[in-house]
Image: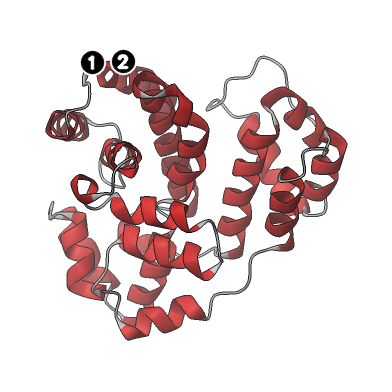
C-alpha cells in the first residue's frame, strides 16, 4: 500500500503533455496518416530533438540518418514512434535527480530503452502476438523511480537509501522500507492518475508478483519482471543479472534458451 504522502505526490502530478493526448487520439483514428502524426510530434521541439538523437544513436544502429519525424514514422511505423514519444514526453515532464538510485537521467533513459528491447526480443520468442504491447509497458515500468527518487531527496533519505542499494540489498525491499511501495506500484499509480488504459497499470503492478497475475496477464507480467531483472539499475546486463533472469524464467516455466542470445546482443549494444 502506497503511503499517504506518496499518494498526495502522485495526485499532484501535472496533466499529461498535450503531445501525448494528441498522439493517442490520432493513433486511435484508423484514417490517420504519417503527416498528421509527424505534425503532432513536431509541436514539441524537445521531444523531436530527443527522438532524433535516440534514433540516430548506436542503440538503434540504423544505416541511414533520420532527419525528420515524418521519416521516423515512415521507417519505424506509427506504433513504435507513438510509444517512443509517450516515453520521451513523460520523462521530459518529470525530469529529476535520480542520484538515490546511483544513476543519471541519461542512464535511466538507457535502462528503460534496453528493458523494452529485452522485453520485445523475449516476447517475440515466447508469444509474438504480444510484442507490440510489451514495448510501451517495458518503457514505462520504471517511471515510478522518478517520483520515488524525488521523495527520498525531499525527505533527506537519499544517502542511506543509496548505501543499502550499493550494499546489494533487494531493491524492492529497500523501496518498501523507505516509502511503503515499490517502483512497479508507483508506476502503476502514476498511469492510473493519467488515465492510461487500466490494463497497462495492472500489468506493470503485477510485475512485482507475476506468479499471482490473472490468467493471460501472467505471461506479460513475467516478461516485464525478466526485463527489469536483466537491465536493472545495478549491474545492467551483468553476470549476476543474467543468472537471476535465467532462474526467474525457470521459476515461471518460461523458456530460458532465448535469454543467453538476448544478453549477448544487448551487452554488445550497451558497451558500443
Q: Judge from the rendering whether residue 9 lies leftward or rightward of residue 68; answer left or right.
A: left
Alpha carbon distance from label 2 to label 1: 8 Å
Q: Where does residue 60 sit, x and y in percent of width and height?
A: 57, 25
Quadrant into which the N terminus falls: bottom left
Question: Where does residue 142 sit, x and y in percent of width and height?
Answer: 40, 53
Residue under the point 44% across and 49% down: 108
The residue at the point 48 percent across, 66 percent down is: 192
Mark 2 closeness class: few <14, some 14–19, many ≥20 residues within 10 Å: few
Q: Secondary structure at mark 2?
A: helix
Question: Is any part of residue 147 visible from this angle?
Answer: yes
Pick whichever, 176 or 240, lies toward us: 176
Residue 262: name its quadrant. top left
Residue 48 placed where, x, y %? 74, 45
Q: Residues within 10 Å of mark 1 (few under 14, many from 20)?
A: few
The residue where tag 2 is placed is 261
* Residue 271 appears in view: no
Whether tag 2 and tag 1 are in contact, CB under 8 A, the answer is yes
Q: How many marks?
A: 2
User: Is residue 8 or residue 150 the one in the foreground?
Assistant: 8
- Residue at numbered disc 1: 257
Residue at disc 1, secondary structure: helix
Left or right: where does residue 157 sit relative to residue 92? left
Compared to residue 119, the image places residue 208 above or below, namely below
Q: Quadrant of residue 61?
A: top right
Q: Is 262 located above or below residue 49 in the figure? A: above
Foreground label between 2 and 1: 1
Relative placement, left or right, of 41 versus 14 is right
The residue closer to the viewer here, 264 or 127, is: 127
Amino acid at each position: 500500500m502506497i503511503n499517504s504522502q506518496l499518494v498526495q505526490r502522485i495526485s499532484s502530478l501535472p496533466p499529461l503533455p498535450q503531445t501525448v493526448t494528441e498522439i493517442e487520439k490520432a493513433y486511435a483514428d484508423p484514417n490517420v496518416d504519417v503527416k498528421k502524426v509527424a505534425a503532432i510530434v513536431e509541436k514539441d521541439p524537445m521531444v523531436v530533438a530527443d527522438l532524433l538523437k535516440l534514433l540516430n544513436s548506436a542503440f538503434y544502429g540504423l544505416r541511414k540518418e533520420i532527419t525528420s519525424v515524418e521519416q521516423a514514422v515512415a521507417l519505424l511505423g506509427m506504433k513504435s514512434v507513438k510509444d517512443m514519444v509517450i516515453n520521451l514526453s513523460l520523462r521530459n515532464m518529470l525530469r529529476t535527480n535520480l542520484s538515490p538510485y546511483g544513476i543519471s537521467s541519461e542512464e535511466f533513459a538507457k535502462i528503460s530503452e534496453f528493458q523494452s528491447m529485452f522485453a520485445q526480443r523475449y516476447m517475440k520468442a515466447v508469444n509474438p502476438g504480444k510484442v507490440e504491447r510489451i514495448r510501451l509497458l517495458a518503457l514505462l515500468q520504471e517511471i515510478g523511480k522518478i517520483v520515488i527518487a524525488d521523495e527520498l531527496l525531499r525527505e533527506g533519505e537519499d544517502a542511506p537509501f543509496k548505501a543499502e542499494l550499493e550494499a546489494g540489498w533487494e531493491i524492492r525491499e529497500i523501496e518498501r522500507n523507505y516509502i511503503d511501495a515499490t517502483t512497479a506500484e508507483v508506476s502503476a499509480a502514476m498511469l492510473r492518475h493519467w488515465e492510461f488504459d487500466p490494463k497497462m497499470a495492472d500489468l506493470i503492478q503485477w510485475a512485482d508478483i507475476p506468479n499471482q497475475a490473472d490468467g493471460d496477464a501472467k505471461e506479460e507480467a513475467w516478461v516485464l519482471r525478466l526485463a527489469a531483472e536483466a537491465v536493472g539499475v545495478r549491474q545492467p546486463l551483468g553476470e549476476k543479472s543474467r543468472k537471476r533472469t535465467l532462474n526467474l524464467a525457470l521459476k515461471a516455466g518460461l523458456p530460458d534458451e532465448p535469454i543467453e542470445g538476448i544478453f549477448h546482443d544487448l551487452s554488445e549494444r550497451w558497451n558500443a
